[in-house]
Amino acid sequence: MIWYISESFAQITYLLGCIIVPLSFLGCLWTCYFCLKRRIMNTFLKYILGLTLANLFYTVANIMSLFRTGNLDSRCKIEGVIRESSWILSLIFASCIAILCYKSSACDGSSFNHGRFFRASLTVGFLVCSFLVSG
């Protein structure tokens, strides 16, 4: 099946992107500000901050796609690396938040090492991300 996109639909989509992408960017900055403003940084807040930063990078890739000028080949590659790595990290951070919520509710919490889990998940996340993006 071949999709035909009319020019008016493409213009509406572009205008919606011009409205929604800056709102997403401002929302990410606002969430980062409130996460970093807190004096106590627990593991949940670290994961929320990581998820927000991954979304912020994805928003930067969306901003890059709105303003395409110049050398499109290298810019498209940079945009692709940012987009791929940010959605992979978003999946990893969201999965870790789900695991952390389950572990906190399923066990008494004394046997679960939050700091070790955070360091291990960051290491695995960045290794998986670099492996998938470089390949």
Image (cartoon, rainbow, N blue to C red):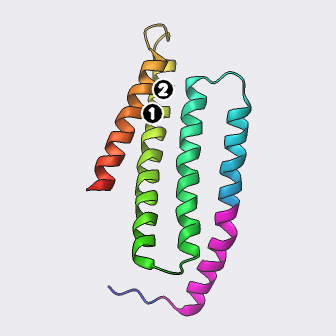
x, y percent for residue 45:
61, 30
Q: Amino acid at mark 2?
A: Leu
Instruction: Tell me which corner region of the image, top left, top right, bottom left or bottom right, holds residue 121.
Output: top left
Instruction: Tell me which corner region of the image, top left, top right, bottom left or bottom right, holds residue 64.
Output: bottom right
Q: Which residue is mark 1?
A: 96
Magenta residues (range): 5-22
Q: Which residue does the image show at 59% across and 78% down from the upper left?
A: 13
Instruction: Tell me which corner region of the image, top left, top right, bottom left or bottom right, holds residue 75.
Output: bottom left
Task: Find numbered disc 1 in the image and state the secondary structure of the residue it sits on.
Answer: helix
x, y percent for residue 2:
35, 87
The answer to whether the residue labelled 2 contacts the one labelled 1, judged by CB atoms less than 8 Å apart, is: yes
Left or right of residue 40, residue 62 in this image? left
User: Magenta region, mostly helix, strand or loop?
Assistant: helix
Task: Find numbered disc 2 in the image and state the secondary structure of the residue it sits on.
Answer: helix
Q: Amino acid at mark 1?
A: Cys
Q: Which residue is mark 2?
A: 100
x, y percent for residue 71:
46, 79
- Please say whether residue 17 is one of the residues in the magenta stretch: yes
